[in-house]
Every structure is written in C-alpha cells, then in structure tokens.
C-alpha cells in the first residue's frame, strides 16, 4: 500500500492551493481527484454561468488572472481552464480518475480507499467541494410528471420541457436561472425565501470591491457573532454582468414572484405568506451594508428602490399544466458519506473549527466562511490553505518528535 504524508481529497482550487503550500513546505503529498482537475467547473455548472466575483478576485497562491479585463467575470469554462493552469504551473501531484470511497483512521495513520487502491497517510485534507444539491423536504412531494432539476444539474433552457417553470430560491443561482428561463420564452415563477440583496455597483465601484476594501471579507470565523448562520446564509443576489439582478428587475421583465415554497399537497404548490417580510428584511440588510460602506468612504451613495412586493398567489395548481418543471436553486452541500471518522455533529454536519477537525490530522477546506468571509470565494483559498498547512506542519512535527522520543527511550524508562 503506498504511503504518503498527506492525502488531499479533491483537485478544485481549494485542494490545489493546499497542495501548493504543502509543496512550499516540502511536505510529501498526493491530491486524489475522482474526475479531471476542476471537475466541478466542468460537470456541475450551467452553460451560461459566469462568476459573480470579478476577475481581479480570481487569484490563488502564486497564480492570478492576468487578462486585460480585471473587472469582467469568468465563464465556467474559463474557470476550469484557470484552475487546470494552476495545477500545471504548481506541478501539483494530482492523480485524476481516483475516487475516494473511504477515509478511516488506522492507528495514528489514515487509510484512504479509492477505486485505484488504498493509501496510508499521516494527515488528510478534505477539499471535496460542495457537490450535492441541498433540497428542501417539500421536494419529495413533487408529482412524477413534473420535471425536477437541481441547479447544479441544470445546463440550459433547451433541456427543460416547454411551458412554465418554477424556480425555487432567490439567491444568485435562482435569480440567474429565472432570468435565463424567462428569456427563453417560458413563463417563470420564482419562490422567494430569505435572500441577500446587493447592488452590482455602488458609488461607481463593484460591490465586491467595497466588501474587499472595507475588510468585511476578512472578518474571521471566530469573530463572527453566529458562525453557523453565517455559513448557511444564501449567496448574494448577483450576476456576473454589469447590471443588477434582483426581484425588481425580474418582475419588470415579467417573472412572477411568490413566497417561499412551503408545501406540495394534492397536486398544489403552497407558498408562504412571508414574502413582504423577507423582502423588507433583505432591504433592511442591504441598507445596513451600504451604511457601513458609506461610513468607511464618507458621504452617501444612491440607494436601490425598495423591493416591490406584488400581490402573490398562495397556491398554484400543478394539474393545470401551468408549471411543467421545477428548478431547485436551494443551495449545495458537501458529500462526506465516505468519511469514516467521528467528526460529525448531531445533524450530520462535519464539525470543524476554522477547518481543523477534532480528529488530529484531519482538515477541511473550501467551505463557506471556513476561516474568514472570503473563504466562500476562490479568493479566500490562498489564506485558508496557508493557515491549514501551518497547523498541519505543527501536527506533523509533534508526531515526529514523539517518534524520536520513542526511538531514544531506553527500555523500561519514560522520557517526557
Ligand atoms: C453555482 C456556483 C457558483 C459559484 N460562483 C463563484 C463565484 O462567483 N466566485 C467564486 O469565487 N467562487 C464561486 N463558486 C465556487 C465556490 O467558491 C466553490 O464551490 C467552493 O469554494 C469550493 O471550491 P473547492 O475547490 O473546495 O471545490 P470544488 O471546485 O467543487 O472541487 C472539489 C473537487 O473534489 C472532487 N471530489 C469530490 N469528492 C471526491 C471524492 N470522494 N474523491 C475524489 N475527488 C472528489 C470533485 O470532483 C472536485 O473536483 C461557485 C460555486 C457554485 C456551485
């Protein structure tokens, strides 16, 4: 069985950033990837997707966007090329086509089982991404004759039947897909729960430039008031283009806005009556954020109009033929079903403290707000990988020091 010091699971940008730091620290490792490098960007993104972060934020340790459009937004294909280019210039030791099916502790090592044999390692870094749709329980009640597609499986409007579409969720994915489907000529309804409304531009700058300049993106996970909530917040209502995309823009183009999908019973979609509340809350938080930016910059910028709350139906029949398909833009989550280490909380979520699990030598990267708000983006991977590699190096030094002590220990004595 091959032995290495560190196994990194996943060759997305997070795993590769860790690999880069491990190489710099001369720590022997391998990156195991079930598909190709940047697999998620090749297989789990819709055709028209563009990053919502501008190109100047597409930067990793020792590698950054170098084109002539720093304020533009990369397509999914361009992100895949960027990440693959990073693997190449880093000479990352990636084994593609290698799916990890189990990670378990064996003594003070880990055994990592794959479809191409097993590895032993002193430490494991999980960089396996968010690759599973997070569907609400109501999804199970959808009748079989309605086409049901999670956002990461959606590709383009042509793959859906003609006729009306319900998009569930109004974060970045939901508003983008509602816009695209509406432009394809379909009647679109969007079901809106809690969402995060931001302008694309504020006071002449991209909103992400403001979040960067004000230090908001650098707020640390251990300083955030409610880290569980911060990690589960919906993504910002943004599109990788030079225009705002919010509920007002969608309504102006003819998309029907309804409340959160609360139930499906007897062939009827039921929507919550909370639309006015969630819109008011989103507007309140939007203005608080802009107040923070104004306090930083001085003066005051022009604000977005409040969200228009339409008189929305509380139910829509699925038997009328009005809705032919449902797109679930309700989030994505990691899949650690292959992780056989007791590091999960009561709700089955991986427990970690800034990427460090309670099991010595087991780390995770690439999750939202992992060590700072910036961790949610490609731009956060560099600093997170540096921190995690530093922690891991200390862990390895402790193990080696213990080994030396054990080697030097004369029989029958106990050196401390
Ligand atoms: C719709 C969408 C839009 C996004 N937009 C932006 C954006 O605008 N800006 C931005 O900065 N970021 C964006 N992100 C990316 C987000 O930053 C990343 O999803 C997140 O940071 C995780 O990156 P990662 O490298 O950890 O994971 P991924 O890129 O998902 O890589 C994980 C890798 O692990 C592999 N893997 C998983 N399980 C196994 C296994 N068992 N064995 C072997 N290999 C395995 C996968 O094949 C994959 O290649 C977006 C993501 C999504 C889904």
Image: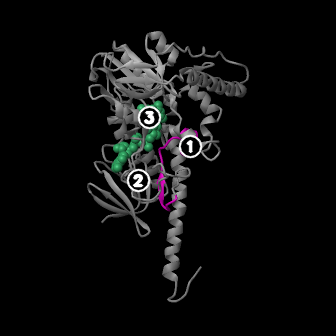
Instruction: Determine the CA span between mark 3 and mark 1.
Output: 15 Å
Magenta includes 88?
no
The image quadrant where one finds the N terminus is bottom left
The residue that mark 3 highlights is 331
Tell me the SS state at disc 3.
Answer: loop
The residue that mark 1 highlights is 228
Magenta includes 361?
yes
Residue 8, which numbered label? 2
Q: Earlier in the sequence, mark 3 or mark 2?
A: 2
Q: Are marks 2 and 1 in contact (CB under 8 Å)?
A: no
Magenta region, residue range:
358-374
Picture residue at 39% right of the left edge, 16% below the top: 188
Mark 1 crowd level (few <14, some 14–19, many ≥20, 10 Å Cα): few
x, y (%) of residue 227? 59, 43
Residue 415, which numbered label? none
Residue 384 versus residue 80 in the image, above or below: below
- Residue 403 visible at all: yes
Mark 3 crowd level (few <14, some 14–19, many ≥20, 10 Å Cα): many
- Which quadrant of the picture is home to ligand 1? top left
Instruction: Determine the CA span between mark 2 and mark 1.
Output: 25 Å
Residue depth check, mark 3 versus mark 2: number of the one nearer the observer: 3
**Coloring basis for residues:** one colour
Q: Are marks 3 and 2 in contact (CB under 8 Å)?
A: no
Q: Earlier in the sequence, mark 3 or mark 1?
A: 1
Picture residue at 66% right of the left edge, 26% below the top: 288
Tell me the SS state at disc 2.
Answer: strand
Residue 279 versus residue 394 in the image, above or below: above
Q: Earlier in the sequence, mark 2 or mark 1?
A: 2
Residue depth check, mark 2 versus mark 1: number of the one nearer the observer: 1
x, y (%) of residue 122? 43, 64
**In terms of image quadrants, where is residue 319?**
top left
């Amino acid at each position: 069985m091959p032995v290495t010091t560190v196994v990194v699971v996943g060759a997305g940008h997070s795993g590769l950033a860790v690999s880069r730091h491990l190489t710099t620290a001369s720590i022997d490792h391998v990156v195991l990837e079930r598909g190709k490098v940047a697999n998620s960007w090749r297989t789990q993104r819709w055709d028209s997707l563009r990053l919502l972060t501008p190109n100047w934020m597409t930067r990793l340790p020792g590698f950054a966007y170098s084109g002539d459009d720093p304020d533009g937004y990369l397509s999914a294909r361009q992100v895949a090329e960027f990440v693959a280019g990073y693997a190449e210039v880093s000479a990352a030791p990636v084994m593609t086509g290698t799916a990890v099916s189990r990670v378990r502790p064996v003594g003070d090592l880990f055994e990592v089982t794959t479809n191409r044999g097993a590895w032993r390692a002193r430490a494991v870094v999980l960089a396996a991404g968010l690759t599973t749709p997070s569907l609400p329980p109501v999804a199970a009640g959808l009748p079989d004759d309605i086409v049901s597609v999670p956002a990461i499986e959606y590709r383009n409007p042509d793959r859906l039947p003609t006729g009306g579409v319900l998009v569930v969720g109004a974060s970045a994915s939901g508003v983008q897909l509602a816009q695209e489907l509406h432009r394809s000529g379909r009647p679109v309804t969007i079901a809106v729960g809690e969402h995060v409304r931001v302008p694309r531009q504020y006071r002449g700058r991209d909103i992400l430039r403001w979040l960067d300049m004000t230090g908001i993106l650098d707020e640390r996970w251990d300083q955030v008031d409610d880290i569980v909530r911060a990690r589960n917040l919906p993504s910002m209502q943004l599109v990788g283009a030079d225009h705002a995309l919010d509920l007002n823009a969608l309504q102006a183009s003819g998309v029907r806005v309804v409340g959160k999908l609360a139930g499906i019973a007897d062939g009827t979609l039921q929507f919550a009556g909370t639309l006015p509340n969630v819109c008011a809350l989103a507007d309140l938080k939007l203005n608080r954020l802009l107040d923070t930016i104004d306090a930083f910059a001085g003066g005051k910028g022009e604000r977005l109009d409040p969200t228009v709350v339409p008189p929305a139906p509380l139910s829509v029949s699925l038997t009328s033929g009005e809705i032919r398909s449902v797109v679930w833009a309700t989030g994505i989550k990691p899949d650690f079903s292959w992780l056989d280490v007791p590091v999960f909380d009561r709700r089955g979520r991986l427990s970690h403290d800034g990427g460090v699990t309670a099991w010595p030598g087991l780390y995770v990267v690439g999750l939202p707000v992992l060590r700072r708000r910036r961790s949610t983006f490609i731009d956060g991977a560099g600093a997170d990988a540096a921190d995690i590699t530093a922690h891991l190096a200390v862990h390895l030094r402790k193990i080696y020091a213990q080994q030396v002590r054990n080697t030097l220990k004369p029989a029958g004595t106990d050196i401390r």
